[in-house]
Image: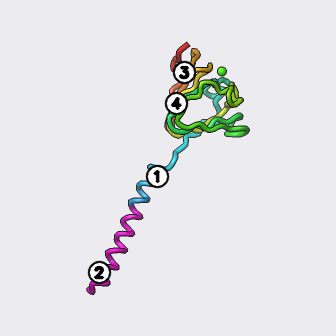
Amino acid sequence: MTKVLRKVITSVLAILMMNVAVNLLVPLVHATFADYPDLAYHLWNDMISSLQVSGTVILYEHQNFQGVSHEFMNSQVNNLADCNFDNIASSLKVDGEVTLWEHPDCAGERAITFTSETYTPDTWGTT
Ligand SMILES: [Ca+2]
């Protein structure tokens, strides 16, 4: 085997190994949104007034991700009225974790947490 051939084979192997590594890592980095198409199912239609999100949440005006939408990343929104979205959201997508409250300033008798994988209904918020 010539030195040149050995170099070519080594380079090809290196590229193949890099492709394998990228294919393994990309799914971990890419956003994985969980879909919640109908907040009425959770008894939370047209109720959300404030939220805290770690990651990304997209709120939609109507069920099945229709109508006006708002996206929030890594933030606390004390009053959705500030973006004309108080008691409006009817469906959402989340990558990470979002907690929603029925009143402004993360308050109310009810709060609910949705994550990329599951949701925890009706934990008690602060009143
Ligand atoms: Ca509300």
Residue that mark 4 sits on: 119
Number of residues whose C-alpha sits closer than 10 Å to that of mark 1, classed few (under 14), some (14–19) or many (20 or more): few
Instruction: Give the spatial CA distance, label 3 vs label 4.
Output: 10 Å
Tag 2 secondary structure: helix
Residue 122: which numbered mark, if any?
Answer: 3
Q: Quadrant of residue 78?
A: top right
Instruction: State yes or no: residue 88 in magenta.
Output: no
Number of residues whose C-alpha sits closer than 10 Å to that of mark 2, classed few (under 14), some (14–19) or many (20 or more): few
Q: Earlier in the sequence, mark 3 or mark 2?
A: 2
Residue that mark 1 sits on: 27
Q: Position of residue 67 (x, y in %)?
A: 73, 38
Identity, as a three-letter code, of the amino acid under mark 4: Tyr
Tag 1 secondary structure: helix
Residue that mark 2 sits on: 6
**Residue 64 visible:** no
Q: Earlier in the sequence, mark 2 or mark 4?
A: 2
**Residue 49 visible:** yes
Considering every residue shown, the one lying at the far right of the view is 67
Q: Compared to 100, does 92 lie above or below? A: below
Instruction: Give the spatial CA distance, label 3 vs label 1.
Output: 31 Å
In which quadrant of the rendered image does the N terminus lie?
bottom left
Q: Which residues are magenta?
A: 1-20
